[in-house]
Image (spheres, helix red, strand yellow):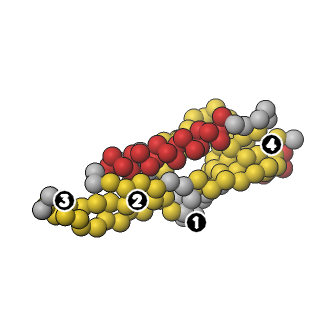
Amino acid sequence: MILRRYGENVQSVEPNFDSKALNEIGFRRDHEVSFEADGFFESHTRVSEHALSAEAEGDVQDAFESMMLDDLLAQLSSLHEGLAEGQVLLIESEKGNDYPKTKTRQKNVVVEGENRLYFYSSIDPALRVGVYCGS
């Protein structure tokens, strides 16, 4: 299960990574589980933490950004699938503080005598995810 803190609550979420969205690295509440935040942190202990990031480059910006977000989603899914019984993932990155965004830079290149744009993109800062175990 993947959880995220919203104010005084910790709620279950689904990844919603979309290269066309303003906030590419998003999560959508699925309303399956909700905890009071204080109660969650009293009854769960962090056993590990992970910083997930990805990079991509190419000449079609949306295509390579989609590949980069797919890579990030694969990393998150791998962590989720590797959870032991009683463990959950908690998205620890906070909006307004250290929430990851797609950073893109571009440069002009000459391809067959024509000027083209070439893009480099990365996720910065990394998506922080903690593995928590209930007691």
So how many labels did they put on this image? Answer: 4
Residue 111 disc label: 3
Question: Dot 4: few (<14), some (14–19), or many (≥20) neighbours within 10 Å?
Answer: some
Instruction: Answer yes or no: is residue 9 visible.
Output: no
**Mark closer to the chain start, 3 or 4:** 3
Q: Amino acid at mark 2?
A: Ser
**Mark closer to the chain start, 4 or 2:** 2
Q: Are marks 3 and 4 in contact (CB under 8 Å)?
A: no
Residue 30 position within the rendered picture, expressed as x and y whole percent measured from the top left: 57, 35
Left or right of 133 in this view: 107: left
Q: CA distance from mark 1 to mark 2?
A: 21 Å
Q: Are marks 4 and 2 in contact (CB under 8 Å)?
A: no
Q: CA distance from mark 3 to mark 4?
A: 53 Å
Q: CA distance from mark 1 to mark 3?
A: 40 Å
Q: Which residue is mark 2?
A: 121
Q: Nearer the viewer, mark 4 or mark 2?
A: 2
Q: CA distance from mark 4 to mark 2?
A: 34 Å
Q: CA distance from mark 4 to mark 1?
A: 25 Å
Residue 91 position within the rendered picture, expressed as x and y whole percent measured from the top left: 63, 50
Residue 133 disc label: 4
Residue 97 disc label: 1
Question: Dot 3: few (<14), some (14–19), or many (≥20) neighbours within 10 Å?
Answer: few
Relative to 18, say whether 57 is above or below: below
